[in-house]
């Protein structure tokens, strides 16, 4: 599958998680970062999306320890939460 199709599918999966909170966190993260990802990072995000939303969100919020296989730059960037729009 070509890169563009892969990213389109990932964007859909990132924005259709089942709850508004997960959509904003995971979809917002995808939108903010995917253009800079290399193939390995795309594969890592694909693997991350196989996990439960509550786990991904807990890792990003720092309320649960991050498994070694995900502990790295991607989760560190997700923990910044500077990509989630907050209505005022």
Image (cartoon, helix red, strand yellow):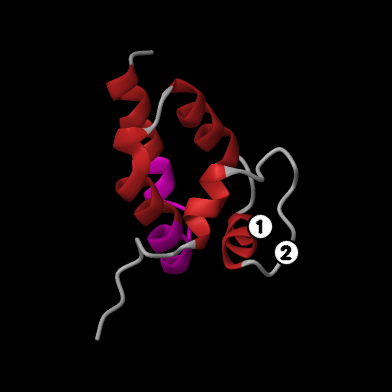
Answer with left or right where residue 48 lies relative to residue 39. Answer: right
Q: Secondary structure at mark 1?
A: helix
- Vertical placement of residue 78 versus 12, above or below: below
Which stretch did the figure color magenta? 12-25
Q: Quadrant of the N terminus?
A: top left
- Vertical placement of residue 16 versus 60, above or below: above
The quarter of the displayed image where residue 59 is located: bottom right
Disc on the earlier residue, 2 or 1: 1
For the point 48% across and 30% down, the residue is: 41
Between label 2 and label 1, give the one nearer the viewer: 2
For the point 55% across and 32% down, the residue is: 44
Residue position marked by numbered label 2 in the rendering: 64
Answer with left or right where residue 75 lies relative to residue 18. Answer: right
Q: Main secondary structure of the magenta part?
A: helix
Q: Secondary structure at mark 2?
A: loop
Out of 25 and 71, give the one closest to the viewer: 71
For the point 31% across and 47% down, the residue is: 31
Out of 58 and 77, give the one closest to the viewer: 77
Out of 39 and 4, give the one closest to the viewer: 39
The mark found on residue 55 in the picture is: 1
The single residue placed furthest to the top in the displayed view is 1
Q: Is residue 72 magenta?
A: no
The quarter of the displayed image where residue 70 is located: top right
Q: Residues within 10 Å of mark 1 (few under 14, many from 20)?
A: some
């Amino acid at each position: 599958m070509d890169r563009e199709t892969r990213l389109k599918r990932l964007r859909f999966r990132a924005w259709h998680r089942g709850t508004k909170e997960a959509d904003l966190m995971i979809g917002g993260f995808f939108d903010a970062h995917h253009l800079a990802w290399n193939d390995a990072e795309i594969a890592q995000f694909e693997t991350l999306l196989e996990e439960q939303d509550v786990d991904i969100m807990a890792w990003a919020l720092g309320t649960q320890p991050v498994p070694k296989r995900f502990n790295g730059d991607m989760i560190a960037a997700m923990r910044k939460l500077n990509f989630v729009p907050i209505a005022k």
